[in-house]
Image: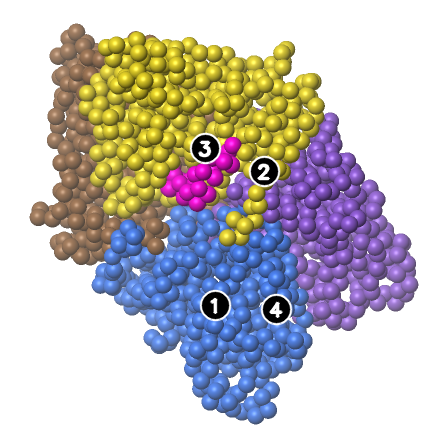
Chain colours: A purple, B yellow, C brown, D blue
Amino acid sequence: MSDQNPVFIPGPTNIPDRLRRAMQVQTQDHRSPAFVNTLAPVLKGCKTVFGTAKGEIITFPASGTGGWEAAITNTLSPGDKVLVARYGMFSHRWIDMCQRHGLDVQIIECPWGSGAPADRFQEALSADKDHSIKAVLVTHNETATGVRSDIAAVRGAMKASNHPALLMVDCVSSLGSMPFEMDTWGVDIAVSGSQKGFMLNTGMAILAVSPKALAMMETAKLPRTFFDFRDMMGANAKGGFPYTPPLQLIYGMAESLNMLFEEGLDNVYARHTRIAEGVRRAVAAWGLKLVAQTPDLYSDTVSAVFVPEGFDSNRLTERVFGTYGMSFGVGLGEMNGRAFRIGHLGSLTESMMLSGLATLEMAMADLNYPVKMGSGVIAAQEYYRATAKPVLAEKAA
Amino acid sequence: MSDQNPVFIPGPTNIPDRLRRAMQVQTQDHRSPAFVNTLAPVLKGCKTVFGTAKGEIITFPASGTGGWEAAITNTLSPGDKVLVARYGMFSHRWIDMCQRHGLDVQIIECPWGSGAPADRFQEALSADKDHSIKAVLVTHNETATGVRSDIAAVRGAMKASNHPALLMVDCVSSLGSMPFEMDTWGVDIAVSGSQKGFMLNTGMAILAVSPKALAMMETAKLPRTFFDFRDMMGANAKGGFPYTPPLQLIYGMAESLNMLFEEGLDNVYARHTRIAEGVRRAVAAWGLKLVAQTPDLYSDTVSAVFVPEGFDSNRLTERVFGTYGMSFGVGLGEMNGRAFRIGHLGSLTESMMLSGLATLEMAMADLNYPVKMGSGVIAAQEYYRATAKPVLAEKAA
Amino acid sequence: MSDQNPVFIPGPTNIPDRLRRAMQVQTQDHRSPAFVNTLAPVLKGCKTVFGTAKGEIITFPASGTGGWEAAITNTLSPGDKVLVARYGMFSHRWIDMCQRHGLDVQIIECPWGSGAPADRFQEALSADKDHSIKAVLVTHNETATGVRSDIAAVRGAMKASNHPALLMVDCVSSLGSMPFEMDTWGVDIAVSGSQKGFMLNTGMAILAVSPKALAMMETAKLPRTFFDFRDMMGANAKGGFPYTPPLQLIYGMAESLNMLFEEGLDNVYARHTRIAEGVRRAVAAWGLKLVAQTPDLYSDTVSAVFVPEGFDSNRLTERVFGTYGMSFGVGLGEMNGRAFRIGHLGSLTESMMLSGLATLEMAMADLNYPVKMGSGVIAAQEYYRATAKPVLAEKAA
Amino acid sequence: MSDQNPVFIPGPTNIPDRLRRAMQVQTQDHRSPAFVNTLAPVLKGCKTVFGTAKGEIITFPASGTGGWEAAITNTLSPGDKVLVARYGMFSHRWIDMCQRHGLDVQIIECPWGSGAPADRFQEALSADKDHSIKAVLVTHNETATGVRSDIAAVRGAMKASNHPALLMVDCVSSLGSMPFEMDTWGVDIAVSGSQKGFMLNTGMAILAVSPKALAMMETAKLPRTFFDFRDMMGANAKGGFPYTPPLQLIYGMAESLNMLFEEGLDNVYARHTRIAEGVRRAVAAWGLKLVAQTPDLYSDTVSAVFVPEGFDSNRLTERVFGTYGMSFGVGLGEMNGRAFRIGHLGSLTESMMLSGLATLEMAMADLNYPVKMGSGVIAAQEYYRATAKPVLAEKAA
């Protein structure tokens, strides 16, 4: 009966009941005049979450990976140069995609656990006198390492080198959970998905695209049809979709936006910070180290945690799943075996988080980790107590 | 967003997803020839859970309280004497109902925290030379005190005094969670409901009735129509219901029985014992005392826990609900203010239970309880670890 | 795959998706301070549907039959005389219940197909010089015959004879579908349920009780506990329930009331009239006769239809269910074999109704009814066309 | 309240309750060892529906359009020649996609309403002496015209000309509703989706790929990452997904396959033929003509119907939606204004279909079509009666 336990993977998140209900929509005609009333508020609401007034929202029935592909194929042409820093599995995968699509990828290698290196970006961009670099690609929240990068600093580097490249940002595992300011940060394309901060089923890629990026879709030569911005924007403008839309997810998005706005985005972000900080206190109490190198890099949606020397993190995630029926994230790529990940995004309460920490402790004890039973739970309890706010008032309202 | 937390009230329980889905049935014609195929397996399956081959299963769209009323009105007449022991709120309420229905109630007063006193029953029954006592009423699991009584011992007392009274048992909060052996124990009417061990929505009273009790329905003079066994049995026998049946709950019951039988009733009971014992270890670690006086009385579905002298248990349940969004049972009746209750029945995992204990600890600390933070969690963790069995095998099967 | 067909039984109705979702509520603590916020709006909203400002709303987890039992047991004492007219199965059953509860039932026998005979009530009441009649019981909408009675006329008869008896009305299959004006009509107790005009699962009896009727609950001697108004009102007043409440149905009621009020009660009633009139046009086109004797008696929620001489209506309902997977109401009581019933209440569209009529025609043809194929459908189509109002505007709003 | 009407668009279909429930799955860890047990039976079951033992099943979180893109990008290189016949909107769109991806498309223009021209394919292939044509693309069921083409005949043409090109088939709106025999017909890639014959939410593209087609993925130079067969097959082989999988749809697919196999694929196809033939009888009775030119081309999932001269089919679909709240398919492309479409695929009963026909008739009458009211309904009723089989037995089983 372990399917009643929450998951602590870094997405998809636990889906709140309210959203599960919202997605239970019978088939409706997506070519009817009513469809536009369903879609339009979602596109509008997403702008607020992305922090953009100027950008266009474009969605596809796909995962975030599809969103990345849409971002590059609609703006770039074979042989175009892009600048990317690799500091985790997801930045790595985006690089791999660019290469497979025939782009010339200039890679800045960084240690996993670090974030986007604004200074090295600036160096590379300043050296690119003829502006052959067409786009800078940054992973906002590197889900493999629990690192959040400073996007404003990257834009700062671009400005300092007076470089006209597009700034594309993967915010799949940050949007709706941590602040994102597309216009303020000067992001040209931001890519996210339905199954993280929006707490829905997987199946919708969501992009916000600046006017500057949109202007490139007419000249971009990378082939695309399913992910073509023009088809989607043209159809959306007439209240439709270029092919069958994921109706249930669109209804889910509408309700997810309602939930986020009712709570208030700032409160949503503060809630994520609080839940995450409790986890970090627990990790410290266990005597373990985060993969993220410095506090300014700590992600509020996922913590990657090194296991002690001589232990295999895969044994831990297997143990906690196989014995206690609870899912945590495995270490990915070069962190496989060395670190495990605690997802703490979406609609989590402190009580749910404590169940995750308490269960991890049991599995660690089973595997003879040098960790004091209860120590992490207590550290989190103390933090959550000290920062608790009454929930009754809001329930009664 | 606290509605994602499990509840730890002693019923209704957290409803497993599988059962929530099973209850999502569109309207069907309850007068169609297909209805019998829906109802019959439920009646048959319930026999197994009640532990009866001879008894009839009779259900009503009502709560357990309605089941009590059905039990007495179908077998007794105004002025009939019944023998009842009062040792908690639910035994008290059944007494109150009997009195309001014009029965002559002989009450054995017992301290709350004790169970059904077989010896005092035997004394009273032996003294009842002319067999004016028509029924002995016993609450199997007193939800107000967390006390499980020994029903076989009560039947033993009846046998020893060679008394022909009916034995009626309230097993609302025990059936499907703790062993119940109607035939072996010689129970004449057992009363339960859909929202406890069956883990469903509230709304169905479920009774098992012995042939001896059934024989009395022709002579019983207490008025009843909605709760009349004859109407219900007559209609059921023809594959119908005497009025509109609670279709969704009937489908829910079918699936609940599937779940219980797939796991195996003995495994279900063992799981409840394990989860409960973890709670009891935590209570001991906190230095608190159970209301149940002795270990043989400990209930595996609910633990009532005394707060320390000078504390008000209502402040605790208010705090944990108002600040952390988690529900525990308040102290009822004479336990109000003195004890709170931890429900641990239905489909709970150890991880869920740990979240309850950890959250209670926070609230106790907030109220300056002399309780060591983490102590209860650690005691439960150690116990759950020591008794863990892999869940993966069953999931993969 | 016939479970996709709508049902055309006179309740429970087809449940709209919106209400199915509303009832998907996880367990919440009914003893928490938040519960009152769930219950109170339901009680308030029901007042509007019953048409009462003065009455109290009292609900029980039961069917409408339980509501009847609550009505009589809370106001009457054994031996009390009640006056009832019998003109169908449901008025008959209420009489039977009164007799089984020891009331002295003065029955006015009326032909099935007629309604409450105000003149004969007046005669009986005028003859009751010493006011031994304590209550007049009327079935507003006799579901067995498709007859709606004139409740105001019954009250008129009571006034004309200056009689102080209570007026109790069964509005189970009318409330929320046809106008009901408790205060204006001088109804003392009105009894309904969740599964008809409220379009929900079966399982909640809903009563509205006048101050005059409430005053009698202190002196009424019929025994009751589960259905006791005092317990329920006392608990409701404190934001609670005297036993476990049917939480999911309470949430369902809240949303059902939202739906009714959003559409507007007058529009809801007009919609029922329109759908019903299409059915009546079809029946006329088939050359069949309604059981209801005159147009003023026609019910807008159910039509009972005589089959031609020499035919057995049970063969028809069996055929249409067994061959086409569609449910219609069988003839009840003395109408069994002679009439079948078409339920047309709740959330039905003209298209759904046409599918019912078309399917009935197929089954009638299969059984060699002297009915012209398509004739009923065409009559209904013409009527629905002539009375159609655009739906698009409301959807787009 | 028109959302209770079935839709009669040619997909997405009305979703059976059983499948709606199956898709209500909480988040699970797609990287857990249990995920393979969820995915593997779906891949296996799909083979049966596609009629392939040798082919591999590959799915993507996308619509059918994404499936097309996967088919061409994994097997072809820029400049490759493909041979396609254009006889409707969907064959047209596939051509457009090929052109946008830089393929050299040799188009056989055919009148809309005709099907894949095996003879002209043979002519073209025979003329292609140096085998520069790498693939033949055929739309099995052209949803815009209601035409089903003979795939075996196309393969026959390829064999006759001894041509080694791949045969790619769009079976989005036919698979699971009409017979499909991949291996027998020699299909190399068949593309379908979740929202048609599988009766699920939109969001999963499903492909079956022959060993011959798979062999080309190593040499194919069209860029792709999201839709890369290698990534997907590699991950699937290890029990995973290359990115976040659409978990709820995978569970839905498992249950959809259960439904199809329980009914039996042959019975599913026969059911579609029967429902479709009733529609065609109605169309004939109205005096209207199908777009499909000859009976051998008639689709069992969608009928495109010409409106009479001087009428605009868009007015009809607007009227029926705006006034009666029912959705039919608009005419697409060159059929826009000239034809409307009746979708009759998925889980439909004859009663549902009759409601569609009856409602269409009302709208046609509103617009003064020269159509006799009731004529189509009667024609369908007579056909459905004559071909009815009892449903009760299966329900009772």
Which residue: 37% across, 59% down? D262
Which stretch did the figure color magenta? B244-273
Q: Kindly identify which residue carries mark 3.
A: B177
Which residue: 48% across, 87% down? D159
Q: Residue A395: which numbered mark, if any?
A: none
Q: Tag 2's secondary structure?
A: loop
Q: In this view, does C113 lie to the left or right of B57?
A: left
**In the picture shown, does residue C216 fall above or below D353?**
above
| Image quadrant assignment for residue D256 | bottom left
Q: Give the amino acid type for the residue marked by disc 2 in the picture.
A: Thr
Q: Kindly identify which residue carries mark 1.
A: D47
**Residue D347, horizontal then vertical, whole percent:** 38, 57
Q: Kindly identify which residue carries mark 4.
A: D229
- Cα–Cα gap, marks 3 and 4: 49 Å
- Tell which subunit mark 4 falls on: D
First in residue order: circle 3 vs circle 2? 3
Q: Kindly identify which residue carries mark 2.
A: B387
First in residue order: circle 1 vs circle 4? 1
Q: Give the amino acid type for the residue marked by disc 3 in the picture.
A: Ser
**In the picture shown, does residue C36 fall above or below A78?**
above
